[in-house]
Amino acid sequence: MMMIALGQFLFDAINYGLNRLFNITHWTFEEALMLQMLPSLLFNLAFALLIYVPMRKLLERSRAAVGTEADE
């Protein structure tokens, strides 16, 4: 989860930097952080938790089932 958060923050920070470089946005970094980056980061982390945890459990169960079939 930490890698997802770090990747999302770096993506948003680079995106803000490029927009600021080419004068597309006039927000300060603090405004962009509070109005764009943090909501996006929280939404993406919540989505990752909703998808990652059930998929991990499903894959662990299927791996265990394959392991017991191979033993027979």
Image: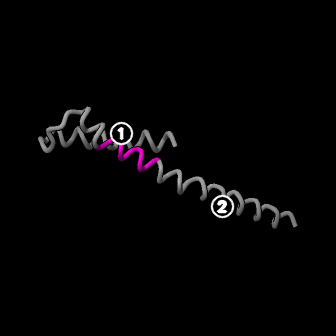
Mark 2 crowdedness (10 Å alpha carbons): few <14, some 14-19, many ≥20: few
**Residue under label 1:** 10
> Residue 57's image quarter?
bottom right
Coordinates of residue 40 in the picture (x, y in percent): 36, 47
Colour scheme shown: one colour
In the picture, the quarter occupied by the C terminus is: bottom right
Numbered label attached to residue 58: 2
Q: What's the residue at 42%, 45% (across, down)?
A: 42
Mark 2: which amino acid?
Leu
Residue in the image at 53% along x and 51% along y = 49
- In the rendered image, residue 42 lying in the magenta stretch gets the answer yes
Q: Say which label, 1 or 2, has the lower sequence index.
A: 1
Q: Residue at x 78, y 61 (%)?
A: 67
Residue depicted at 39% across the width and 44% down the height = 41
In-image side of 2 versus 60 (left or right) = left
- Residue 64 vs residue 50, the one in the foreground: 50
Residue 10 among those drawn in magenta: no
Q: Which residues are magenta?
A: 36-45
Amino acid, disc 1: Leu
Of helix, strand and loop, which one carries label 2?
A: helix
Q: Nearer the viewer, mark 1 or mark 2?
A: 2
